[in-house]
Amino acid sequence: MSENVKSTNLRFNLDKAADKKAWEYLQTMDKEEFRSYSHAVAVSVNYFFDRYYKAKDDPYLETREKEERFVQKIVEAVEHALGNVLPLFLSGYAAALCTAAQDGTMIIPKSTAGIAAEDSADNSGTDEADIEVNPEDIPWDYLDG
């Protein structure tokens, strides 16, 4: 046997619940994922002790992980809800802001377009006219989601 290979024996007392459960896992493990008992035991021991030492150094690790998963679920739910509602909301909002002129163009009042007279390039103090927009120039396909 090579110097780089270490051998040990494992015993499972099937009268003990923990041993029995471990033995059953080894008997039903995915053979493509875990090539042998040795591989499964090595992965398990590494995972256990990695978490053990992290938890020992950081006693709130598990609580923070649960909180992060909970927050992620909330974020995903809000994103999903907004994805369903936002296009309809924006189209209704845009329709409420715009009024149609006789020639088919839309007129957006400057006050609702978010453009203040003092912010415009012309600071002469005169009241600027409303903005006219041709509906054919607007890319409405963004509303499809």
Image: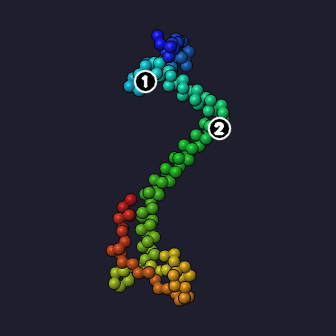
Query: Is residue 2 depicted above or below 86 in this figure?
Result: above
Sequence order check, earlier mark of 2 and 1: 1
Q: Residue at x 49, y 15 (%)?
A: 5
Residue 53 seen in the current view: yes
The amino acid on which the numbered mark 1 sits, given as a three-letter code, is: Phe
Query: Is residue 89 depicted above or below 98 in this figure?
Result: above
Where is the C terminus found, in terms of image quarters?
bottom left
Splitting the image into 4 quarters, where does residue 141 fall?
Answer: bottom left
Position of residue 47 measured from the top left corner of the image (x, y, whole percent):
54, 28
Residue 111 seen in the current view: no
> Coloured how?
rainbow
Q: Which residue is mark 1?
A: 34
Q: Which residue is mark 2?
A: 60
The amino acid on which the numbered mark 2 sits, given as a three-letter code, is: Tyr
- Mark 2 crowd level (few <14, some 14–19, many ≥20, 10 Å Cα): few
Position of residue 3 measured from the top left corner of the image (x, y, whole percent):
50, 13
- Mark 1 crowd level (few <14, some 14–19, many ≥20, 10 Å Cα): some
Q: Residue at x 51, y 46 (%)?
A: 73
Secondary structure of the residue carrying tag 1 is: loop
Q: Residue at x 62, y 29 (%)?
A: 53
Nearer to us: label 2 or label 1: 1
Position of residue 106 measured from the top left corner of the image (x, y, whole percent):
39, 79
Q: Residue at x 46, y 83 (%)?
A: 130
Identify which residue, 140 or 58, lies in the foreground: 58
Determine the CA span between mark 2 and mark 1. 31 Å
Splitting the image into 4 quarters, where does residue 17 fall?
Answer: top right
Total labels drawn: 2
